């Protein structure tokens, strides 16, 4: 039996949305989407109000439009409209890599910086519709660059600062950027990242780029190309401090963002202006139960969609205080997150399961020595969170006091789709629980038959939909339809599998590609992984299928032990017995490989497709590995693989 965590009484007292409101709003959002979103669209400031709300078709030549005849500007919504009421309030708390380095930036200051950069970009010839690649570390200028693009109507494409010159070049070429905004060097965990040098290398093969703006972060020695490269500080100082924001149509593109690539070649996901901002702001407010003055911290990088929607756009549209962290969770030591929470009195904390699991390995002491008394709410995103990690997060980090919102969504969806609302939803560890407003999940079998009741299946989303959904793959609308709407015609297919329980709660079981079929029993890899991680000696586990003569597919588990535990034959047997006891004999791993590390994307997701290849003994064809964080991990796994047949 899954333990149920009701809404804590204290939390319920102040929560924005209670159970009754959730039900009423949800019903209206799916039955009367025009009425519902017509009202909620008004949370934004429109230059020309919309008269149409929803114009969506998931069939045929897929077309998705919201608020299509309205005009607005995203930067004006995130900055200008707050100046009168909260100009001197902090917009961004910046916490540097070095614990002694932090600052507060007010809405007024941020507005001025954005106006200056906007003017500088216009002087460089940037106009509405141009693409700008941003390759910056987690510094305030990253938000400034995003908002300046939005202000002048340019489409930004952020490339995570950890990506190689090749990966950067590919993303610049895909959208023909004419401007790159970067820094001399980045700083993470005390180490320097040669951003400008990477840009120089990438630009050897990118002919579209005319200008590069370079922020001075470390003052390190870099090469500036005359005529092409400009110091951000010089341009800003010379530029005027005010700028009139460009009037954009609700359906004008806001940004392109490439997916993390855990399943294949990254796709250039395109989001537009009005619907995206409305949805990012609304989910930020209600999922995180954001109240004026709360200090909110999302630990993602702005290079991922989570950073776009929940560090910059959602929070700033709401006039929130958003914390931006340059460093890593383990520098100078593994209690950094909690030290930062205490230092800035963080109320809402949003991170990824991978971070939680790696911090779990370090033990409770390092968490418990900090206060964390300011925390009110915790969040998780990026992968299924194993119940074990959920319970640890709840008990150790949140002192049994803070609800956890396990938020399921994708780059493609722009914002959170399945999630608890902390004042309305009783929690079950490991479940993302229920759909947000407008979101209509359907469970579908392999043939496309819609399944009712408590079942397991492929997770699809039906119309009406929500305004934050992606509109197309940049430059390839056909691939958009093909990728998301052709598997089950008329439905958006998420690529994820899920289980719906008798309470109507959703449990994401992982990607459908990762489902394994053992002797005719279909099993999500997440379930076996959760069982393994629940063992006290296991820190992390990844499970894939491999060809098995008798069972069709066998279960191959990669297991990382917690610090100080020895991999022994005895422990291997113990783990097999453990899973057998936790789930049943059908789930017992056939092969267990000890893996000191797992191949992850740079956003920290396990790349199971690589693990699958190694398990299949087909490691010659690993596919696109450009988004891999540490390639040496793969070499070690290949060398010590268990299936050599
Ligand atoms: P690609 O699409 O290129 O393979 P990706 O799917 O990893 O990469 P993202 O858009 O960053 O790129 O991640 C979205 C996916 O992450 C979801 O489809 C889901 O598989 C997983 N995910 C995100 N949040 C959760 C969550 N709370 N619970 C379970 N899975 C999650
Ligand atoms: Mg995906």
Image (spheres, helix red, strand yellow):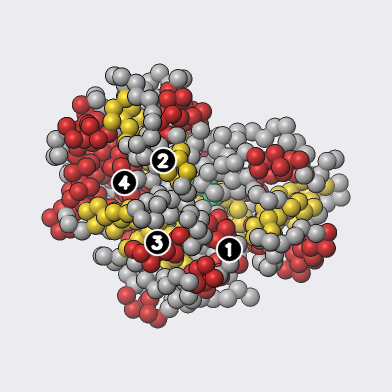
- Label 2, label 1: how far apart the Cα atoms are: 27 Å
Label 3 packing within 10 angstroms: few (<14), some (14-19), many (20+) = some
Tag of residue 138: none
Tag of residue 186: 2
Residue 87 in percent (x, y) is at 16, 55
Tag of residue 340: 3
Above or below: residue 372 compared with residue 257: below
Give the residue at x 51% y 28%: 166
| Residue under label 4 | 140
Indicate the secondary structure of the residue bearing disc 1. loop
- Label 3, label 1: how far apart the Cα atoms are: 17 Å
Which quadrant: the C terminus?
top right
Looking at this view, is 211 or 249 the one in front? 211
Indicate the secondary structure of the residue bearing disc 2. strand
Q: Can you tell which quarter of the image residue 576 is in?
A: bottom right
Among numbered discs 3 and 4, the one appearing first in the sequence: 4
Among numbered discs 1 and 4, the one appearing first in the sequence: 4
| Residue under label 1 | 362
Does label 4 point to a residue whose CB lies under 8 Å from ligand 1?
no
Give the residue at x 45% y 20%: 204
Indicate the secondary structure of the residue bearing disc 4. helix
In this rendering, the label closer to the viewer, 1 or 4: 1
Q: Mark 2 touching mark 1, by CB under 8 A?
A: no
Residue 233 in percent (x, y) is at 25, 35
């Amino acid at each position: 039996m899954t333990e149920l965590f009701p809404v804590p009484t204290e939390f319920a007292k102040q929560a924005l949305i209670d159970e009754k409101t959730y039900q009423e709003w949800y019903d209206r959002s799916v039955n009367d989407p025009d009425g519902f979103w017509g009202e909620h669209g008004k949370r934004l400031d429109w230059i020309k109000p919309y008269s149409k709300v929803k114009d969506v078709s998931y069939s045929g030549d897929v077309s998705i439009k919201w608020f299509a005849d309205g005009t607005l500007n995203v930067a004006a919504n995130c900055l200008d409209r707050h100046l009168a009421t909260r100009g001197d309030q902090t917009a961004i708390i910046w916490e540097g890599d070095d614990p002694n380095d932090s600052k507060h930036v007010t809405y007024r200051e941020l507005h001025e910086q954005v106006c200056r950069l906007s003017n500088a970009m216009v002087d460089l010839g940037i106009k509405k519709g141009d693409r700008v690649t941003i390759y910056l570390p987690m510094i305030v200028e990253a938000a400034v660059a995003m908002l300046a693009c939005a202000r002048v109507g340019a489409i930004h494409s952020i490339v995570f600062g950890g990506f190689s010159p090749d990966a950067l070049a590919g993303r610049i070429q895909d959208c023909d950027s004419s401007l790159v905004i970067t820094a001399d060097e980045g700083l993470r965990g005390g180490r320097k990242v040669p951003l400008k040098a990477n840009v120089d290398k990438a630009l050897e093969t990118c002919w579209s780029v005319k200008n590069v703006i370079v922020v001075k972060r470390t003052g390190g020695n870099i090469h500036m190309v005359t005529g092409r490269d400009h110091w951000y500080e010089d341009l800003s100082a010379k530029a005027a401090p005010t700028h009139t924001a460009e009037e954009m149509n609700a359906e004008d593109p806001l940004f392109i963002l490439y997916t993390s690539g855990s399943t294949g070649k990254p796709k250039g996901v395109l989001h537009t202006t009005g619907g995206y901002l409305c949805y990012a702001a609304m989910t930020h407010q209600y999922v995180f139960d954001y109240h004026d003055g709360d200090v909110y911290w999302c630990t993602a990088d702005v290079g991922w969609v989570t950073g776009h929607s929940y560090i910059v756009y959602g929070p700033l549209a709401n006039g929130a205080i958003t914390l931006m962290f340059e460093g890593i969770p383990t520098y100078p030591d593994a209690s950094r997150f909690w030290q930062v929470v205490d230092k800035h009195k963080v109320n809402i904390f949003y991170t990824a399961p991978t971070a939680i699991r790696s911090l779990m390995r370090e033990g409770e002491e390092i968490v418990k020595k900090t206060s964390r008394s300011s925390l009110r709410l915790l969040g998780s995103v990026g992968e299924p969170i194993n119940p074990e990690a959920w319970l640890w997060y709840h008990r150790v980090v949140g002192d049994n006091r803070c609800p956890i919102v396990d938020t399921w969504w994708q780059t493609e969806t722009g914002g959170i789709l399945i999630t608890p609302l902390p004042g309305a939803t009783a929690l079950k560890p490991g479940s993302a629980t229920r759909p947000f407003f407008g979101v209509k999940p359907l469970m579908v079998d392999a043939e496309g038959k819609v399944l009712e009741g408590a079942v397991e299946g492929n997770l699809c989303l039906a119309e009406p939909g929500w305004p934050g959904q992606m509109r197309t793959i940049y430059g390839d609308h056909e691939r958009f339809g093909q990728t998301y709407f052709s598997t089950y015609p008329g439905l958006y297919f998420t690529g994820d599998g899920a289980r719906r329980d008798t309470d109507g709660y959703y449990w994401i079981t992982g990607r459908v590609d990762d489902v394994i079929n053992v002797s005719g029993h279909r099993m999500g890899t997440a379930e076996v992984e959760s069982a393994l991680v629940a063992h006290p000696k296991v820190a992390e586990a990844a499970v894939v299928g491999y060809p098995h003569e008798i069972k069709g597919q066998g279960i191959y588990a990669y297991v990382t032990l917690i610090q100080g535990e020895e991999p022994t034959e005895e422990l291997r047997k113990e783990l097999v017995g453990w899973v057998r006891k936790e789930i049943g004999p059908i789930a017992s791993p056939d092969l267990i490989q000890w893996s000191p590390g797992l191949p992850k994307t740079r956003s920290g997701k396990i790349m199971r497709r690589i693990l699958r290849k190694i398990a299949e003994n087909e490691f010659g064809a690993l596919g696109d590995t450009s988004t891999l964080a540490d390639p040496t991990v793969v070499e070690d796994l290949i060398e010590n693989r268990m299936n050599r047949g």
